[in-house]
Image (cartoon, rainbow, N blue to C red):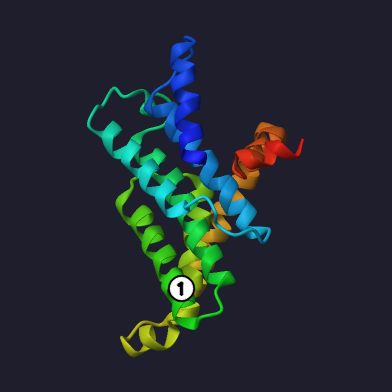
Amino acid sequence: TCKDMDREVVDNGDREGFKGGQDVHFELLLSRIRGVVYLMRLGYEDEWDLEDLFKDAQNELSQALGHSDDSLFVDIAPAGQMQRLDYARIEYYRLLSEQSEDEEDKNSNILKAAQIAIRMLIEDDYVIGEAAVLSLKALIGCLGHEAMILESDGLDVSDARTRLFQYRHIIEESLSLRYSRDGDMIHREALKASNMGDFNMEWF
């Protein structure tokens, strides 16, 4: 399976003297997850047990959290690594909601994506820009599907959606200006490409 292959890549790297360990395996899992989500978006079935891959990535992250000097957090803080994983989760559940023909399953996946988004936006002091944008999209989508229930609880859904759209626009503008100011559009496009996952490399 792809899980066995990823573990084998890390183990072989260790034997040959290359850097390996939790940080490498976490990156492999995250790349694999993104690749599978991308293939699912193209119409392929989930034959790689994405839920299991998410659990494995979460386990790697949880184990690393027990060691403040873990190599997984050399370049990105624990909250940032969690946001990268949550970003993939939100993408996955939003995709499931789009593809589901059963209304109950659709609503369930929309709610799951929104719950992950709320955790990130409320609990973390800093949020990766792209992750913040996707989280706001998930919340906006949830408001659209749960409007009647939320309005019955006294929430002004229209006002809430307007504010979320405004926040998303502000962040998107900030991201656009940052890349434009730095003259680093190549870096941004490379980041987008890498977020699609490792399966794309097989096309070249």
Q: Nearer the viewer, residue 84 or 63?
A: 63
- Observer able to see residue 109: yes
Image position of 176 with respect to 105: above or below: above
For the point 77% across and 35% down, the residue is 204
Farthest residue, direction right: 204
> Taking 69 as reference, is 138 left or right?
right
Farthest residue, direction left: 66
Image position of 136 with respect to 126: above or below: below
> Taking 160 as reference, is 202 left or right?
right
- Observer able to see residue 127: no
Q: Residues within 10 Å of mark 1 (few under 14, many from 20)?
A: many
Q: SS class of the residue under badge 1?
A: helix
> Taking 201 as reference, is 157 left or right?
left
Q: Nearer the viewer, residue 48 or 82?
A: 48
Q: Position of residue 1 (x, y in %)?
A: 50, 41
In this figure, which residue is indicated by the disc labeled 1? 142
For the point 55% across and 46% down, the residue is 34
Q: Position of residue 132 (x, y in %)?
A: 48, 53
